[in-house]
Amino acid sequence: MSINDVEIVEYRPEYGLEVVKMWRQSFQRAMNLPEQNRSDELHHQLDYFCSINPDGIQVAIDCSSSAIAALMVLVPGELDHLYVGVEYQGFGLGSRFVQEAKRLSPLGIELFTFQKNTRAQRFYLSRGFVEIERGFADLGTNPWASSKEDLADIKYRWQP
């Protein structure tokens, strides 16, 4: 796979299910969770994803296979979601999305990542983000969590 084989496009509803599958696999791997795609959980997460304003969603598509390679949800001042498919990690897609987020957010960006996700922490720190706060995510929006420690998160900020 080459980064040149990937095109970043605006989100379209027909991408929904494949985006959610990629998102789940990437998240489950990062958080060391069992990888699975139970139908009820997929549909619940797809419903959640469909509630996000599509104007802020961009996806990366592998032109050679039409697979969803990555996802970015950017709302004004906040990088709400950035996930790169497991088989596409390490090729620069995450960096490409962060550069685009910075370009679209000239006043700065904030984001959260879980403390368990040390790879994401290294990624954001190496791209100029600084830690500004630690806390806990909401259990109600993170049903995968089995303890409060699972919900420990870090807030980062990038300012030009």
Image (cartoon, helix red, strand yellow):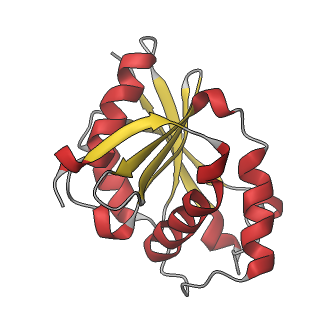
Q: Using the image as rendered, state which of residue 110 and residue 59 is in the foreground.
A: 59
Residue farthest along the top direction in this orientation: 106
Tell me where residue 113 appears, x and y as whole percent.
51, 53
Q: Is residue 101 above or below residue 21?
A: above
The residue that appears at 61% across and 72% down in the rendered structure is 150
Tell me where residue 71 appears, x and y as whole percent.
48, 48
The residue that appears at 50% across and 72% down in the rendered structure is 25
Q: Is residue 142 above or below residue 146?
A: above
The residue that appears at 36% across and 69% down in the rendered structure is 86
Q: Using the image as rendered, state which of residue 3 and residue 126 is in the foreground.
A: 3
In-image side of 19 versus 66 (left or right): right
Q: How many marks?
A: 0
Tell me where residue 69 appears, x and y as whole percent.
39, 56
In-image side of 18 versus 107 (left or right): right
Tell me where residue 90 appears, x and y as whole percent.
21, 59
Residue 9 quadrant: top left
Looking at the rendering, in which quadrant would you find the C terminus?
top left
Looking at the rendering, in which quadrant would you find the N terminus?
bottom left
Q: Is residue 68 above or below residue 81?
A: below
Residue 158 quadrant: top left
The residue that appears at 72% across and 71% down in the rendered structure is 42
In-image side of 49 versus 26 (left or right): right
